[in-house]
Structures are given as C-alpha cells and as structure tokens.
Image (cartoon, grey):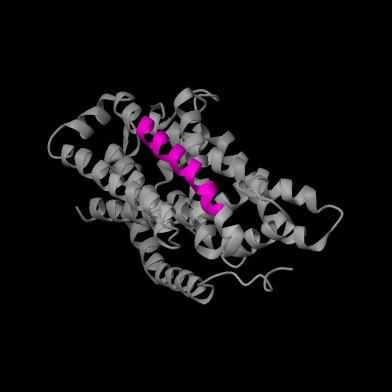
Amino acid sequence: MFGLELSFIWAGLIALSVLIYVILDGFDLGVGLLFPLSKDEEERNLMMNSVAPIWDGNETWLVLGGGGLFAVFPLAYATIMPALYMPIILMLLGLVFRGVAFEYRWRTTRWKGLWDISFFGGSFVAAFCQGIALGALVQGIEIENRAYAGGWWDWLTPFSILTGVAVTMGYAMLGATWLNMKLEGRIQAHMRRLAWPFAIATVVFMGIFSIWTPFLDGEYYIRWFAFPTAIFTFLVPALVAVAVFGLFQGLRRHWDVTPFLCALALFVLGFIGIGISFYPHMVPPSLTIAEAAAPDSSLKFALVGTLVLLPMILSYTAYTYWVFRGKIDPAEGYH
C-alpha cells in the first residue's frame, strides 16, 4: 500500500515539475516567438533582457521532470521516448539554438540578424514540438507486452498538430503579457496590442481541444461526463471563463500584472483538465501510475534526495524572481 502511495506522490511531483516548467519557460519561449513582430533593435534588446536573468533557471524544471520520469517511472520513460523521439529531439535542438542565441547575439554586429532568427526559430520549434508531444500523449500511445508497439510517425496527427499550434499561441500570449508587465512606454503598448490576438487564439484553441479530447478515447468521455469527475467538467470551464474575463479586462484597462496572472491561470486550468483525463494513467490509455513505477526501494531513495533538492530549487527560483522584479531598466542588461 505504501508503495502505491509513493508512486502517486511521485506522479504528483513530476506533474508539478512539468507544470512549473510550462508556466515559467512558456513565457520566455513566448518572448522569442514575438521577436519577428518587434519594431526595432531597442525593442528586441529589451525583450531579451526581460528574460535573460531567468531563462536558464526556468529550464531546470524540465530537467527535474524528465530526470524524475526516468528514475521513478522507467517503464513510462521507455514507452514515451520511442513514441516521441522526433518531437523531443527537435524540441531539445530548438532549446539549444535558443540558448546559444542568448549569448552570441550580444557579441556580434555583423551576425546579429542570424542570432535573432536562431532565437525565434529555436523558440518556435521548442514550443511547437512541446505541443505536438502533448497531443500525441493525450491521443494515446500503443503498448504491447510493456513496450511501445506503434509506428515512427504515430505522433504526427491532426490532433497533435492542433495541440502544437495551440501551445505555440498560448506561449506567445504568455510572452506578450509578461512583456506588458515588465516594460514601459511605447514598447509596453505594442506588447499589449500583440497580446490580444494571441489571447483570443489561445481561448479558441482551448475550446477546440476541450471538445475534441473526450472523443479520442472512451475512458476520457467517462471521466469528463460521469459522476463525480463530471463536477470538474463544469467547474474548470467556469474558472477558465473567470480567467479569460480577467485577462481581457486587464488588457483593456492597461493593467500590468493581472493579464499575466490570468494567462498563467489558463495554463494551470488546462493542465488540471488534462490531469483529470489521464488519471490514474501515466501513459494513456493502458499504463497506470502504479504499473509504471519503479520498485519501492528506488522510489524511497529518490524521494529523500528530492525532498532536499526541491525546496532549494523553489527557493532559488523565488529569490531570482524577487531580485529581478519590477520594470526593466533600458540601461541594464547583457549589452
């Protein structure tokens, strides 16, 4: 029984790590997505400076989530990776090119345009492939004899492409609302205007995703529309409506913080909706959390280290955001 409880504790920790990664790295990927829409060099410099002190710390949570999956849910890792090799490899390459662009862009004049393209391209590829991977996981991974039994291109479907576009639009919305919060003057006004179309697109895609998902698998339909989980089917959309109202009201009234917090709330609520669909599976539609877990001894050993490291990472992250709070000073930054 204790082993069963440990597996669910670990599933919660990995889900938390993935959620924190999505909402933190989501907005700095969104900044990269908005790069082609910037008006001049000053705007691009300020956009990049708004995330320069924090972007690498944000990606710590991706390492924690992926490493935790490998350590404590090896069967899930062994089935997810073969199914999603291509989008995951492309995502990592996108993050590499994007990270290199952060450093090299400030050290050249002749090739600055190339690194601007790399910053945008890496952000786009990473965001789009994260969405595709999510869509492929939601639609289900074929497993036989505790191994992946699908084909090389099973991840590429209309649903996964839709999810890729949805996540990309959502990240751009997060980036625009983040920049609205961090910048001032004409650049802030420009980002606030950009937030509108991306926010509308995000809400539309969330609606399509929510309507489509219950019909992907009978288990999803039951969880969404059978008691008691059907309660969340009405509660989550109601909370989404509140967040959407706060987002658009904040943009309309030129508020700084509220649009960003409401945009984050949309991602959190979407994550909760996916969690309701998945539970109690680790890899839908057939591999449960308990079945995918490592032996109890491994779960206990890894949990001890995590209980030490997790508060440290949380403290470091909170401290970083506290130090770099407030508006961006145009005179400070990488340059």
Q: Is-magenta flag for residue 207?
A: yes
Compared with 60, 164 (above or below) is above
Q: Read off the magenta span.
A: 191-209
Q: Quadrant of residue 257?
A: bottom left
What is the chief secondary structure element of the magenta stretch?
helix
- Looking at the image, which residue is at 59% across and 34% down? 86
Residue at left 34%, top 53%?
246
Q: Who's the residue at 65% across and 59% down the image? A: 48
Q: Would residue 273 appear left or right of 32 to someone viewing this image?
A: left
Quadrant of residue 102 within the rendered picture? bottom right
Front-lying residue, 36 or 309: 36
In the image, residue 224 lies at what x, y percent?
22, 34
Q: In the orientation shown, which residue stands out farthest toward the left?
A: 227
From the image, which quarter does the C terminus lie in?
A: bottom right
Place of residue 136 in the rendered image (x, y in percent of width and height, measured from the top left): 45, 31
> Looking at the image, which residue sits at the far right?
110
